[in-house]
Amino acid sequence: MNEWAENGRAGYPRLHRVPQRLPERVKDSSIEEGKPLLRVLAGEAAWPSPLWLMRQAGRYLPEYRALRAEAPDFLSFCLTPELAIEASLQPVRRFGFDAAILFSDILLLPWALGYPVSFAEGIGPNLAPLDGRADLAKLDLARVPEMIEPVLQAIRGVRKALPPACALIGFAGGPFTLACYLVDGRGGEFERTRRMVREEPVFFAELIACLTQAVLGQLAAEAEAGAEALMVFDSWAGLLSPRLFRSFVIEPMATITAGLKARFPTLPLIGFPRLAGLNLEAYGQLAGVDCIALDSGADIVLARRLVSSSIVLQGNLDPFALLCGGQDMREEALGIGRAVRHHVHIFNLGHGVLPGTPVDHVFELIALWRGQK
Ligand code: CP3
């Protein structure tokens, strides 16, 4: 049997709409050409839509838990290319997803900037809370290329090993979300960050400007190493009021997309402004992304109306529907299917796979999605 999952699609998806901005080569009706995920990101509708899951690698997979035991801590795991390569490939091998996402973490960037970052088992990330200009001066952009070399090696290795129809997604954290972890030092309500945004706006803007350049540099390096699409996880974007969302989510993202498009004009960019709500409209107009990943709270029909049809939507099944499975999961997934049937879409969750998710639910979801007529 093929090493790659047999439950993959039988042939490539049917295509039914070719928007104007498609480059000539993709208009070719030979559907053997190209990776489904990349073709959809270029604006070409496919049905059933290509599918991958945020946090598709990780603790819900027994093979990940076994592999994870080979490294003393999560940071060393991410920085050992053989382990990161294998963790990226595991879910593709098991489930036949249309994309692999680089196995790494958004908090590797603060670490690469010279900031101490650790992951406490069972608790989560731990950073020395950033406080004032002396700490900001510790963030050293010049170190990043050398420090992330193991991550780039992992990208090169995954690209070589992937099956031909599977695309590789590289990623980084959004500047605001990175600032949340830097300023608060850990996950939670991010109270220090939310005060700093208002009480020290000039300083906070300097921090965001520094992180924006760092994210741009990281993503450009990932693209050069072989990532075929890039995603920016701004998981805590929804904590901001519309005014601050513009300054600290949309504007930094627009700088990042402009910088990347100047160097890699055809490289697709996915933004994940989680919990953006009605700010999605401005994000779609101004951030410059090719695709918006929707969280589970976003009504995908309304989102489609708020965002230009030239932007692909990705998402947005509730990870708890996948965790619990059964009829509820089937109804939710098929409801998304009905809503996106005639749009350019990538199937995904609205946030990451939860650690307790049964592997069988993932198999069932994939069969259900790919079995749609
Ligand atoms: O499969 C994939 O999606 C690729 C790997 C990936 C990880 N983290 C692995 C990871 C990706 C894309 C991320 C992104 C990430 N990391 C985000 C943005 C997306 C989101 O979930 O909102 C954020 C906010 C982080 C920060 C982070 N890393 C937290 C809060 C935690 C602890 C909570 C948790 O889920 O354990 C991590 C650790 C982490 N990152 C783990 C994994 C697999 C668990 C650590 C382990 O396996 O020991």
Image (spheres, rainbow, N blue to C red):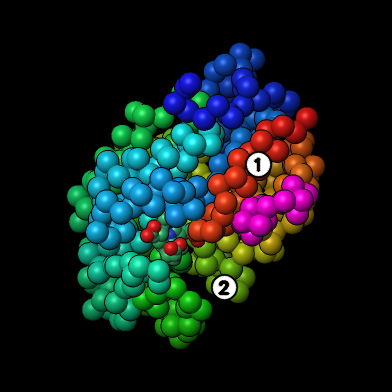
Q: Element type at marker 1?
A: helix
Q: Earlier in the sequence, mark 1 or mark 2?
A: 2
Indicate whether 167 appears above or below 308: above
Amino acid, disc 2: Leu
Q: Which residue is mark 1?
A: 364
Amino acid marked by disc 1: Glu
Task: State the image quarter where residue 200 is shown.
Answer: bottom left
Task: Name the residue rendered at 72%, 27% in the picture.
Answer: 17
Q: Secondary structure at mark 2?
A: loop
* Residue 169 x %, y %: 45, 41
The residue at the point 60 percent across, 40 percent down is 363
Picture coordinates of residue 275, whole percent (x, y): 62, 64
- Relative height, residue 363 to residue 246 (above, below): above
Identify which residue is drawn at 58% across, 29% down: 8
Where is residue 65 shown, x and y percent of the image? 39, 52
- In the picture shown, does residue 162 fall above or below 290? above
Stretch in magenta: 317-332
Q: Please state if 138 lies on the left or on the right of 36 as rendered.
A: left
Q: Relative to the observer, which residue lies in front, 114 or 84?
A: 84
Which residue corresponds to mark 2?
240
Name the spot of residue 279 as percent of width and height, x first: 65, 63
| Ligand 1 placement by image quarter | bottom left
Residues 47 and 194: in front is 47
Q: Which mark is residue 57?
A: none
Q: Main secondary structure of the magenta part?
A: helix
